Each structure stands twice: as C-alpha cells, then as structure tokens.
C-alpha cells in the first residue's frame, strides 16, 4: 500500500496500538476464555429513504421468537443437490435452544426443500458450503441458497450463487459471555451516500411481554461515501449475553450498495 493511501493512517493506528499483540494471541487461541469473531455483510440494493439490514437477506431484521429447526428453502438450483455438481452440503452456525454456539450440516436437495436440522436454533448468523462438498473443483453453490425456519415463517439467511458463504451483518451472543465491538469498516457506493446505524437488543429471549427488552442504537454514521473505518484504540460497545447485534443502512440517492466488516471480542464470563 502506498504511504499516501487514505487508509494508511488508520491501519498504522490499528497495527501499532498497544492491544495489537494481545489480539494476535487471542486469534492464535493463546488467551484463555477469549476469542475473536469476524463478521461481514453486504446489501446490494439498499433502499432510498428507509433502513434495511446490511445482509444479502435484505429488508428488516428477521428474529425468531422461539427456537426452531431450520432447513434449505424450496426453489433453489437443481445442481445444488446431494450428488450434483453444485453445493452438496451446507453448514449452518448459530445459537441453539440453550443459547450455546452450535453448527449442523444440511444436505442440499436441488429445487426442493431440504430435511430440517435435528437441533433447534434461536439464531442463525452464518451459513457456508461445506469444505469438500461442492460437486466440481473450484465450484460452489450454483444458485442462491436460503435458510428458513421449518415453520416457514421467515427467511433467516442467504448464500448468493457462486459465493459459498453468507454475507450477513448480524450476530448474536451466546450465554455466559460478554462481548465487545472491536472495529468496523463500511464501504458504500462512492456516488451515493448512505447512513449507517448499529443496534443492540439484549435479552432476545424476552418474548412474553407486555414489556420487552428494548432495541438500542449504539452507533450512527451519516452520509458515508466510499470507505470508512471505525477503529477505536480498544474494544468498544459492550454486548451482554443473549444479545442481537446488527447493522442497517439507508441511501439518500435512489438506492446504494453497502458492505460492512466488523470484529467482536468474546470473553467467557
């Protein structure tokens, strides 16, 4: 990178911070009860004048109000099938009915709905084509793969065709953890400014009412054009256990494309 690159100063501060060595050791699994979660999301069609989640699922955030099994939605590509030349298996990752982090594999079924998982999930925040299970060398999923709850009440997450992994600017914290937002990189269409906001909703299992745990705004950036980085000297924004976190964007000029990249430090209580 040239010395005069606009991002050089931000990177210098990040890698020369007093915390850089510590985070490296965490990433190497050398710090007990600490780990780093890396998430990224993208919305290729952010609406004009209204907010949408920064995810390929789009629209408003989708939250289950009770744990449910999940499956691949009907209407995929025939090549994404067990024994096909596309994706043969997809792994989903999230929080189970006990609020613990879990993964489970789902065998693809072409254009038809797949079998449901055996585990019930409160949240799904990542899905990917499983290593070694694409039908062709260098290949991935032939079509979009959407994960839904078995009740078919909502689309939860989506892998776009040929990408092999979700772009989903949402996450949820497991029980008995406290997490911290480490930094954010936002990229918006350089010709169309976008507003970005970051939310936390703790106690996401508080679903009985009449009083619910509130959604709370944590960060807001107006009129982002091109690349923008939020790089605090240390972790910021504490995230309690069993909390939803997500990013939203809105465009002010006929729609925009927005991507988000963020890191979270997770500490076991």
Image (cartoon, rainbow, N blue to C red):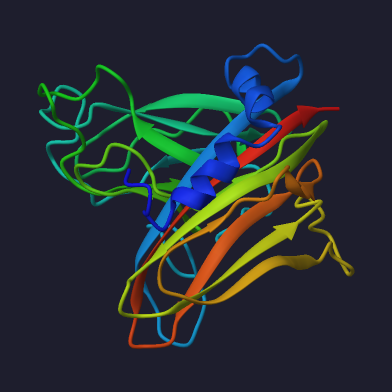
In this view, the residue farthest toward the top is 30
Q: Is residue 29 above or below residue 12?
A: above
Q: Is residue 180 above or below residue 91?
A: below
Residue at image position (81%, 44%) is: 240
Location of residue 127 (image quadrant): top left
Residue furthest to the front in view is: 3
Q: Considering depth in this image, is 247 or 131 the residue closer to the camera? A: 247
> Which residue occupies 63% across, 14% down?
29
Q: Is residue 177 left or right of residue 127?
A: right
Instruction: Please indicate, yes or no, whether residue 150 appears anywhere in the rendered image.
Output: no
Using the image as rendered, state which of residue 171 and residue 118 is in the foreground: 171
Front residue of 21/192: it is 21
Toward the right, the furthest residue is 211
| Residue 79 seen in the figure | yes
User: Measured from the top left, where is residue 12 in percent x and y?
Assistant: 53, 42
Which quadrant would residue 214 be assigned to in this image?
bottom right
Q: Quadrant of the N terminus?
A: top left
Does 93 sit above or below residue 54?
A: above
Q: Position of residue 179 (x, y in %)?
A: 75, 39
State the image quarter where residue 116 is shown.
Answer: top left
Quarter holding the C terminus is top right
Answer above or below: position of 219 versus 32: below
Residue at image x 38%, y 44%?
Answer: 166
Q: Report the side of 164 relative to 119 (left or right).
A: left
> Which residue shows up at 25% across the image and 42% down it?
163
* Image position, residue 123 (x, y; %): 60, 43
How many numbered discs?
0
Q: Nearer the viewer, residue 114 or 260?
A: 260
Q: Residue 44: x and y, percent?
A: 32, 65
């Amino acid at each position: 990178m040239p010395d005069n690159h606009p991002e050089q100063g931000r990177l210098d501060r990040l890698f020369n911070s007093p915390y850089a060595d510590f985070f490296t050791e965490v990433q190497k699994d050398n710090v007990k009860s600490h780990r780093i979660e890396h998430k990224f999301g993208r919305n290729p069609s952010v609406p004009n004048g209204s907010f949408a989640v920064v995810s390929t699922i789009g629209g408003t955030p989708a939250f289950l109000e009770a744990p449910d099994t999940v499956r691949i939605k009907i209407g995929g590509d025939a090549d994404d099938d067990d024994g096909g030349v596309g994706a043969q298996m997809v792994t989903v990752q999230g929080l189970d009915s006990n609020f613990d982090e879990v993964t489970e594999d789902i065998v693809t079924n072409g254009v038809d709905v797949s079998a449901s998982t055996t585990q019930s999930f409160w949240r799904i925040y990542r899905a990917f084509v499983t290593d070694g299970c694409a039908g062709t060398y260098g290949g991935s999923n032939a079509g979009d793969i959407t994960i839904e709850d078995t009740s078919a009440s909502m689309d939860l997450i989506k892998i776009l065709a040929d990408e092999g992994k979700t772009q989903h600017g949402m996450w949820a914290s497991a029980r008995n953890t406290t997490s911290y937002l480490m930094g954010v990189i936002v990229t918006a269409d350089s010709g169309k400014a976008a507003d970005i906001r970051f939310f936390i909703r703790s106690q996401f299992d508080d679903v009985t009412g009449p009083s619910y745990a509130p959604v709370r705004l944590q960060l807001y950036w107006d009129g982002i054009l091109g690349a923008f980085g939020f790089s605090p000297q240390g972790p910021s924004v504490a995230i309690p256990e069993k909390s939803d976190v997500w990013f939203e964007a809105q465009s002010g000029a006929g729609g925009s494309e927005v991507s988000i990249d963020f890191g979270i430090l997770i500490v076991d209580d």
